[in-house]
Amino acid sequence: MLPANWRAGLAAAVGEGVFVTPAIDGVVLAVGRDLQGDGDYARLVPPLLERLSATFGHAAWFVSHDEAEVHGWGLGRRGELVRAYVHAADRGELLWHGDVTDTEQLLGCFEADPRDHSDDPSWWPDERIVMRLAGEWAIDPTRLGERALPPSAGLLGRL
């Protein structure tokens, strides 16, 4: 792990690695390509959230990749995986664990779109839903520009 400022850490983690941010209102973000693994989310997400939540009490995980059309989220508490879901447009549902949470219900997740009049109406997640869940469970990273970010360095490394 190497110290990195926000700009360098985020830029480097896009290609490979993970940038662990300084705390923002008590929330630490870990972002980067290594958190996607090889796309086997059912293998990656449960143990990651179990370990992190055992250590920190609460851990949330999110993926939103519009180009690959992969969107998902997960929540761990006190070492237990509470909820996890990942959907890929080309492969369908890749991970489903636990019951739909109150927050997912409030955001309209898994409800058919009333504008869809096809024979098989369906609901698919998108970046908007993922970021709204992130804001409810942890912090919405798309709104970081609205906050005063801590000037301290984070850590950049590989999983």
Image: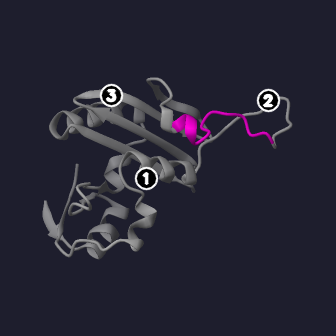
Q: Residue 60 versus residue 34: which sits nearer the camera?
A: 60
N-term-proximal mark, 3 vs 2: 3
Looking at the image, do the residues carrying marks 2 and 1 touch, with CB atoms under 8 Å apart?
Answer: no
In this rendering, the answer to whether 109 lies above or below 7 is above
Could one spot residue 68 in this view of the protein? no
Q: Residue 35 versus residue 85: which sits nearer the camera?
A: 85
Could one spot residue 101 in this view of the protein? yes
Q: Residue 53 versus residue 67: which sits nearer the camera?
A: 53
Q: Label 3: which residue?
A: 81
Label 1 SS: helix
Residue 130, given in percent of the width and then of the height, sits at 50, 48
Label 3 SS: strand
Residue 48, given in percent of the width and then of the height, sits at 27, 37
Q: How many marks?
A: 3
Q: Label 1: which residue?
A: 135
Q: Label 2: which residue?
A: 120
Does the magenta portion include 108?
Answer: yes
N-term-proximal mark, 1 vs 3: 3
Measured in 3D between alpha carbons, the distance from the residue under mark 1 to the one under mark 3, in whole angstroms, is: 19 Å
Image quadrant assignment for residue 6 = bottom left
Hey, what amino acid is under mark 1? Gly
Hey, what amino acid is under mark 2? Asp
Measured in 3D between alpha carbons, the distance from the residue under mark 2 to the one under mark 1, in whole angstroms, is: 31 Å
Residue 7, given in percent of the width and then of the height, sits at 30, 75
Examine the residues drawn in magenta and state their main secondary structure.
loop
Quadrant that contains the N terminus: bottom left
Horizontal arrangement in the rendering, residue 11 relative to residue 159 (left or right) = right
Hey, what amino acid is under mark 3? Leu
Q: Residue at x 36, y 44 (%)?
A: 61
10 Å crowding of disc 2: few (<14), some (14-19), many (20+): few
Q: What range of the chain is rendered magenta? A: 104-114
10 Å crowding of disc 1: few (<14), some (14-19), many (20+): some
